[in-house]
Each structure stands twice: as structure tokens, then as C-alpha cells.
Image (cartoon, rainbow, N blue to C red):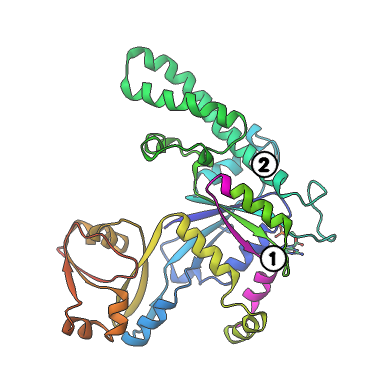
Amino acid sequence: GFNCGIVGLPNVGKSTLFNALTRSGIDAENFPFCTIEPNTGIVPMPDPRLDRLAEIVKPEKVVPTTMEFVDIAGLVEGASKGEGLGNQFLANIRETDAIAHVVRCFDDDNVIHVANQVDPTADIETINLELALADLDAVERSIQRLTRVVKGGDKEAIATKAILDRIQPHLAEGQPLRSFGLDADEQYQLRSFGFLTLKPTMYIANVNEDGFENNPHLDIVREIAATENAVVVPVCNKLEAEIAELEDEERAMFLDEMGMEEPGLDRVIRAGYGLLGLQTYFTAGVKEVRAWTVKVGATAPQAAGVIHTDFEKGFIRAEVVGYEDFVALGGESGAKDAGKWRLEGKTYIVKDGDVMHFRFNV
Ligand code: GDP
């Protein structure tokens, strides 16, 4: 699975968000293959398409796909120098696929701010600086090591060192690598470093209930994000925590009263999914209708491999019906009659919403 680490200064609303996410979550028992740490929550991907498919197929069970969120508490100034729980914190972030950076954009005299005033620019800089310094440390060590290696004329080492030399000053200024403008080849060349500031990042602007518009704090976050190709998701974490407590029926009424189409959390979860370049395909059998996550661009065998590695190894063909066709034609047999049921081979690139059935050798 893929995961997204929640970071931010103390008291910005991280735990509130994390608790809301996990409370709306599914029971760990349904996912026996995952060992779950207390700071890790497996959150179902909201996807109305799953319900539409279930209406047609009427399966015994409906299983959403999921995204994992990890609450990474403990970042303080000086973390990159190993202060506080700094090292542990950075190690935890290194293991995540994407970062959700919570920024306080709400005024509330009852909630103490670590720097005594709500200041998104300073908050973002503080966190980004620690992450950039951690990356800088890795870069400088590697430059030292590679300086010896390049004397031997190793082409790959020379190329890698050349990139590291270029990015070093950017990090030294406290700037994240995602704003450096590395091309895909360069990023690929640096993949083994697992740079923190190169991870796909979204800013969760934690606003008050009435803070979605005319909120200068939020405007600032948007401006900063634009300079680094980062995504901004404004959300009121406190409100989301309240919504997550409600039973389904109450929740629907509450959202309606608030004029909200869906919980703000759904936007957070979807943004995390988008950030990682993920998409969904479905399997639709009478036992189970289920959503699965694959990378955009995945082939049919790779999609099969998400269910089981044997499916990928022994892949023969995939039976595929596009989601729209499946729904419009009332299911698989209707799609077959209309000529919308296809057999696809190993090179087929999966499309978002494909309803798939795999044929494989065991
Ligand atoms: P963390 O240290 O980043 O995990 O922050 P918490 O989630 O513990 O939140 C710190 C305090 O801010 C708590 O008292 C929350 O109730 C409060 N808080 C969180 N989100 C909001 C919000 O959107 N508006 C307001 N007014 N308070 C919030």
C-alpha cells in the first residue's frame, strides 16, 4: 500500500486530523495483512462508484481501497541536528511515500501557538528548513564520498555528483528540492537517496469553520505552495473531527445543514491519492465488489499483481469493461452484448475505473 505522513509544528491540528481520519476508518480486522502501529491509520478511499457497482452486482461484500496515514509528531526546530526526537522523526518521514504538511491557518486565543502568533510563512519555513537540512546533510556526505570515487572515472558517479553539486546550494538556502526543477531523469538518478523535500507534498491549511474565504493565512499558504508545485487542501480539522464522530445518518444531515457535499476529509484522502499518481480499478464478482489501487500508467499484469503476485507471474489476459459502460449497460453480460467487454493482453495500460477480471496460470 501507499502511505502519507502527517507533519507540522506542534499544536497546528495534526492529531485532530489524524483522529478524524482514523475514526472514519475501517476496522483493522478487515485487513489482516497489515500490522498497524498506533500512529498509523488505514483510511478507506471514498468512491461513490463502488456503491454503483454494488447495486448492479449485489455482492456479499463491498471492499474499498485504502490509503494509509501516519501521524508523525515531534518535529521541532533543530530536528535535523538531532534535537528532541529529531532523528526518529526524520526516519519516520523517510519511510512515507508522500507528505501532508498541516499548517495552522486559524486564529484561536485558546490554542497556544509555539511561536506565539499564527504565521503560516514562518511555520512552513521552519518545517521545510529542517527537512532541507536533513537532505543537505545526506547530499554533503555523498559529495564527500563521491569525490574519491569520481577520480576512478566512474561515469555514473560523475553524473550523480554533478547533480548533487548543483542542488547543494539550493538546500543550503533551506529550499525544498521539489522547487529546484529536477527533470524526470535527474529525479530517477537520485531515487535511492529518498530525499525528504522531493517527496510529493500537500499543505493542509487548517482553517476555522468560517475560514475558507477571506482568510489571509490561507492565501499565504496558497502563494507558497504555488512556488513549489505543492497542492493546498483547506480543511477545518476541528469540524472534521466532529463529523467523524457522527453515525452515517446524522452525518448526512449535518453535512446537508452545513451545505457540504462531503466531509472535508474526503478531499484530503483524494488529494493524497492524486499526489501519489494513483488510480483505482475494480473487481466485481458476486462474492465481492472491490476497489484496488494502482499507479497511473500501470499495465494489466501489474494491476493483477496488486491482488496477488501469482496473478502477475501467471498473467494470461484481462477481461475489461470500462466503468461507465459497466454501469450504463447494467453489468458484465450487458457489456458483452453491447460489445464493450474486451480481452486485453500484457501491454494494456489500465484506465481509472476499469472493471477487471484476470485470467492466469498457476
Ligand atoms: P497537534 O499538536 O498538531 O497534533 O495539534 P492538535 O490536533 O492536538 O490541536 C491543538 C489544539 O488546536 C487542540 O486544542 C485542537 O482542538 C485545536 N484545533 C485543531 N484544529 C482546530 C481548528 O480548525 N480550529 C480551532 N479553533 N482549533 C483547532
Nearer to us in this view, 82 or 210: 210
**Number of other residues with Cα within 10 Å of mark 1, as a class: few under 14, some 14 to 19, many 20 or more:** few
The answer to whether 271 appears left or right of 293 in the picture is right
160 is higher (above) or lower (below) than 103: above
- Provide the residue span drawn in magenta: 226-247
Nearer to us in this view, 104 or 37: 104
22 is higher (above) or lower (below) than 94: below
**Number of other residues with Cα within 10 Å of mark 2, as a class: few under 14, some 14 to 19, many 20 or more:** some
Q: Can residue 35 be seen in the rendering of this structure? A: no
**Amino acid identity at mark 2:** Glu
Which mark's residue is nearer the viewer, 1 or 2?
Answer: 1
Which element carries disc 2, helix, strand or loop? Answer: helix
Ligand 1 shown in quarter: bottom right
Which element carries disc 1, helix, strand or loop? Answer: loop
Residue 316 falls in image quadrant: bottom left
> Mark on residue 213?
1
Q: Indicate if the residue with disc 1 has its beta carbon within 8 Å of ligand 1.
A: no
N-term mark: 1 or 2? 2
**Amino acid identity at mark 1:** Glu
Nearer to us in this view, 136 or 26: 136
Residue 77 falls in image quadrant: top right
| Residue bearing mark 2 | 125
The answer to whether 284 appears left or right of 62 in the picture is left
| Image coords of residue 273 (percent x, y) | 46, 60
74 is higher (above) or lower (below) than 330: above
